[in-house]
Image (cartoon, helix red, strand yellow):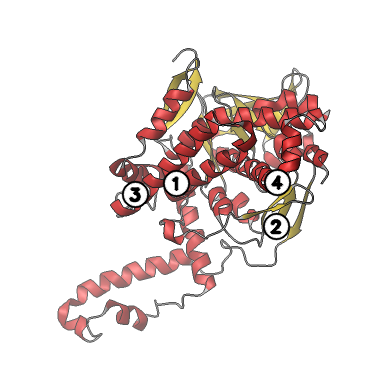
Amino acid sequence: MDIEAILKDQVSHVAAENRPPFESNFDFAKFQDAKNSAVDEWKSLGKEGQARFNSDLKVFLKHKKLSPDENQDFHNGKNLYLLNNEINARIGVKSNIDLIFLDELNFPNPAMELLENSENIDHIRDLYRLRKKTTGSERNSGITADEARRLKNCLRQGRELYLSSRSGPLMVKPLTLFYSLTAYAYVVVILNNPIRFKLDNLPGSHGMNYLPDSIEAQFGGDMPHGTFSDLLTSFPTNSVRSRDIDYSQSSLNPIKEFYKNRYTVTPGTLLSMIPEIRDYYKITTGRDSRTHPLEINVITDRRSTSWELQIGDGITRPPASDIKQAFNNFKTSERHGKTIITIPAAEEHLAQASIYSDIRGRLWYVENPFFPVVLPELCVHFLLTSIFSNLMRYSPDHWGEVLLNQVNTNVSLIISKYLSAFELKMPILLLRSISKFHPIVSSES
């Protein structure tokens, strides 16, 4: 095994051979409208009229040709309908997730306290209705107390594993972090994914592969669906939040594209997307990080409001090709060595940019090696912790050499810095994904 392969920056993809779960010629919205009208007609028939159909609504719907075969086209059409509804309910409106500020001197403890506070059955049912704009709305029954109890157990397990990681040795940290993240991921999925409603319906797979010979991760396309693919679909919009900024990008196209190609990627590529280790990435690989400081300001004139995105630090900025694909058809310019993008507020959801936020709420533009797929930050960490936990489990000799600094010191340095950075950030990311809060670590809290 070439342990230095960890530092490689390499991405490849091949077209999928299966049919994506959000591709369909079935117009589910039209079907749903017709079915609702038929149900109203059924009610108006009264007992006498319903008796002609054995007093059975299903028989009546079949008579109306509104009982389609439960084929793949029908299911895919329904998936697309639910995804579209959730996206439309989120874009163009202020988030109902409140900002909360945590003291930077002691933020890990209150962050864990907030996560532990979520381990309540009634609270979980409230969170389901809060975080799902459509399938979790008041007109739906939400989730049962029994389902909430099961999610509570996932939260408890995730927290216990995370605390074990924080107090445990570096030797096993990737494994405890990955399993903690996996337990929490189940909750993220049920509370946010518009086509997942029960733990029993989740596929029994990680939804990704680890390739031990090349130390790479494989995801997307025609791979068996599982936790990773469900996690990605749990972000129907990319929420851009800071103290003063609050808007969402539609993830419809990125999610659809995810299932069209299978990607193979090295850890070095994924590590280049983590803002907290950007300096260490440069030191250890000799390459620039893919992360760039991002500042967003509001520009208002008499006729409209726009967002002005300033990308870069005045010295380095993303390649023009990356900017073009992320902000196609938006006005682009340069000022003081930074790339300037102007986005009318009414069109903010059309951008397809990878934008991450650090624990202090500072925004970062991330060059996207997977475009048109846009990976949520939590998905990048899922891939990285999976790679390192597999390396630890199946190649303990090589993993021990990494930790003991008996291989390339750059490999040892970047892995240890990544693990410590993610361990600090993980509770913050989780709270932003499963709670009623969007925490920001601040000295002014």
In percent of the image, x 71 and y 46: which residue is there? 370
Q: CA distance from mark 4 to mark 2?
A: 11 Å
Mark 1 or 2, nearer chain start: 1
* CB under 8 Å between discs 3 and 4: no
Q: CA distance from mark 1 to mark 3?
A: 10 Å
Q: In this view of the protein, can residue 329 be seen by the observer?
A: no
Q: Position of residue 88 (x, y in %)?
A: 47, 48
Q: Quadrant of residue 279?
A: top right
Q: Amino acid at mark 1?
A: Val
Q: Which mark is residue 32?
A: none
Question: Can you tell which of label 3 and label 4 is closer to the viewer?
Answer: 3
Mark 1 or 3, nearer chain start: 3
Q: CA distance from mark 3 to mark 2?
A: 34 Å
Mark 4 or 1, nearer chain start: 1
Q: Amino acid at mark 2?
A: Asn
- Badge 2: few (under 14), some or many (20 or more) residues near its Cα, within 10 Å? many
Q: In this view of the protein, can residue 28 be seen by the observer?
A: yes
Q: Quadrant of the C terminus?
A: top left
Q: Which mark is residue 261?
A: 2
For label 3, the residue is: 148
- Outermost residue on the top side: it is 444
Question: Can you tell which of label 4 and label 1 is closer to the viewer?
Answer: 1
For label 1, the residue is: 187
* Label 3 residue SS: helix
- Badge 3: few (under 14), some or many (20 or more) residues near its Cα, within 10 Å? many
In the image, residue 334 sits, relative to residue 122, either above or below, namely above
In the image, residue 196 sits, relative to residue 357, either above or below, namely below
Question: Can you tell which of label 1 and label 2 is closer to the viewer?
Answer: 1
- Badge 4: few (under 14), some or many (20 or more) residues near its Cα, within 10 Å? some
Mark 4 or 2, nearer chain start: 2
* CB under 8 Å between discs 4 and 1: no
Mark 3 or 2, nearer chain start: 3
